[in-house]
Image (cartoon, rainbow, N blue to C red):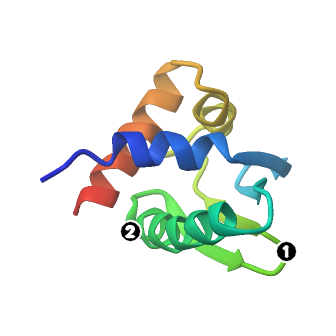
Amino acid sequence: MPSAEPSLLRFLNALSVAHHVPGRIRLKLSAPVGGELLALADQAKSFGTAFSAMAGIRAVSLNPLAKSCTIEYDTKIIPATAWTGLLSGQATPGSEALRQRLVAAVQS
Protein backbone atom coordinates (compact mmCIF):
# COMPACT_ATOMS: atom_id res chain seq x y z
CA MET A 1 0.00 0.00 0.00
CA PRO A 2 1.48 3.43 -0.91
CA SER A 3 2.41 5.77 1.89
CA ALA A 4 -0.03 8.53 2.78
CA GLU A 5 2.84 10.68 4.01
CA PRO A 6 3.49 12.89 0.91
CA SER A 7 -0.21 13.57 0.42
CA LEU A 8 -0.62 14.25 4.13
CA LEU A 9 2.28 16.72 4.18
CA ARG A 10 0.92 18.63 1.16
CA PHE A 11 -2.48 18.84 2.79
CA LEU A 12 -1.10 19.94 6.18
CA ASN A 13 0.98 22.66 4.49
CA ALA A 14 -2.25 24.14 3.11
CA LEU A 15 -3.81 24.41 6.60
CA SER A 16 -3.53 27.16 9.17
CA VAL A 17 -5.06 27.66 12.60
CA ALA A 18 -7.97 30.09 12.52
CA HIS A 19 -8.93 29.63 16.16
CA HIS A 20 -7.82 27.29 18.91
CA VAL A 21 -8.83 26.67 22.49
CA PRO A 22 -7.79 23.42 24.14
CA GLY A 23 -10.31 20.82 23.02
CA ARG A 24 -11.45 22.64 19.87
CA ILE A 25 -9.50 23.85 16.85
CA ARG A 26 -10.72 25.50 13.65
CA LEU A 27 -8.45 25.09 10.64
CA LYS A 28 -8.55 27.12 7.43
CA LEU A 29 -7.57 25.75 4.05
CA SER A 30 -5.50 28.24 2.11
CA ALA A 31 -5.46 27.49 -1.59
CA PRO A 32 -6.19 29.52 -4.68
CA VAL A 33 -9.52 28.97 -6.36
CA GLY A 34 -9.22 26.42 -9.14
CA GLY A 35 -7.85 22.94 -9.63
CA GLU A 36 -5.60 23.00 -6.59
CA LEU A 37 -8.50 24.00 -4.34
CA LEU A 38 -10.66 21.20 -5.76
CA ALA A 39 -7.91 18.64 -5.17
CA LEU A 40 -7.41 19.87 -1.61
CA ALA A 41 -11.16 19.80 -0.99
CA ASP A 42 -11.20 16.12 -1.94
CA GLN A 43 -8.27 15.51 0.40
CA ALA A 44 -10.08 17.43 3.15
CA LYS A 45 -12.96 14.95 2.95
CA SER A 46 -10.56 12.02 3.21
CA PHE A 47 -8.65 13.52 6.10
CA GLY A 48 -11.89 14.53 7.82
CA THR A 49 -12.96 10.90 7.70
CA ALA A 50 -9.54 9.80 8.96
CA PHE A 51 -9.60 12.34 11.81
CA SER A 52 -13.09 11.15 12.79
CA ALA A 53 -11.77 7.59 13.20
CA MET A 54 -8.85 8.60 15.43
CA ALA A 55 -8.78 8.03 19.18
CA GLY A 56 -9.19 11.32 20.99
CA ILE A 57 -11.25 13.00 18.27
CA ARG A 58 -14.80 13.77 19.38
CA ALA A 59 -16.17 15.48 16.27
CA VAL A 60 -15.08 16.81 12.88
CA SER A 61 -17.09 19.38 10.98
CA LEU A 62 -16.11 20.38 7.44
CA ASN A 63 -17.38 23.60 5.87
CA PRO A 64 -16.30 23.56 2.20
CA LEU A 65 -17.72 27.00 1.41
CA ALA A 66 -15.73 28.62 4.21
CA LYS A 67 -12.73 26.37 3.48
CA SER A 68 -12.61 25.46 7.16
CA CYS A 69 -12.71 22.44 9.43
CA THR A 70 -13.51 22.36 13.14
CA ILE A 71 -12.15 19.50 15.21
CA GLU A 72 -13.22 18.79 18.77
CA TYR A 73 -10.71 16.62 20.61
CA ASP A 74 -9.86 15.20 24.02
CA THR A 75 -6.89 17.07 25.51
CA LYS A 76 -6.06 14.05 27.69
CA ILE A 77 -5.27 12.09 24.53
CA ILE A 78 -4.10 14.85 22.17
CA PRO A 79 -2.25 17.75 23.81
CA ALA A 80 -3.23 21.19 22.51
CA THR A 81 0.39 21.89 21.54
CA ALA A 82 0.42 18.89 19.18
CA TRP A 83 -1.64 20.80 16.60
CA THR A 84 0.80 23.69 16.33
CA GLY A 85 3.71 21.33 15.83
CA LEU A 86 1.81 19.21 13.32
CA LEU A 87 0.86 22.19 11.14
CA SER A 88 4.24 23.92 11.36
CA GLY A 89 6.25 20.76 10.72
CA GLN A 90 7.93 20.84 14.14
CA ALA A 91 8.81 17.38 15.38
CA THR A 92 7.62 17.45 18.99
CA PRO A 93 6.54 14.30 20.81
CA GLY A 94 2.89 15.41 20.67
CA SER A 95 2.94 16.44 17.01
CA GLU A 96 4.74 13.26 15.96
CA ALA A 97 2.22 11.10 17.83
CA LEU A 98 -0.64 13.01 16.18
CA ARG A 99 0.99 12.72 12.72
CA GLN A 100 1.52 8.96 13.16
CA ARG A 101 -2.10 8.48 14.24
CA LEU A 102 -3.30 10.47 11.25
CA VAL A 103 -1.13 8.53 8.81
CA ALA A 104 -2.39 5.24 10.27
CA ALA A 105 -6.00 6.42 10.03
CA VAL A 106 -5.56 7.55 6.40
CA GLN A 107 -4.04 4.19 5.44
CA SER A 108 -6.79 2.11 7.06
Q: What residue type is labelled 2?
A: Ala
| Mark toward the start of the polypeptide (1 vs 2) | 2
Mark number displayed over residue 66: 1
Q: In this view, does 64 lie to the left or right of 13?
A: right
The answer to which quarter of the image holds residue 64 is bottom right
Label 1 residue SS? loop
Residue occupying image coordinates x 75% and y 79%:
63
Horizontally, residue 90 falls left or right of residue 100, namely right
Per the image, the residue denoted by label 2 is 53
Q: Which residue lies furthest to the front in this view?
A: 35
- Type of residue at label 1? Ala
Q: Position of residue 60 (x, y in %)?
A: 60, 72
Q: Residue at x 53, y 73 (%)?
A: 42
* Residue, far left: 1
The residue depicted at 63 percent of the width and 40 percent of the height is: 13
Dot 1: within a 10 Å radius of its alpha carbon, few (fewer than 14), some, or many (20 or more) residues? few
Give SS at disc 2. Answer: helix
Give coordinates of residue 96: x percent, y percent. Answer: 44, 28
Q: Which of 73 and 52 is in front in this view?
A: 52
Tell whether 48 sits left or right of 62.
left
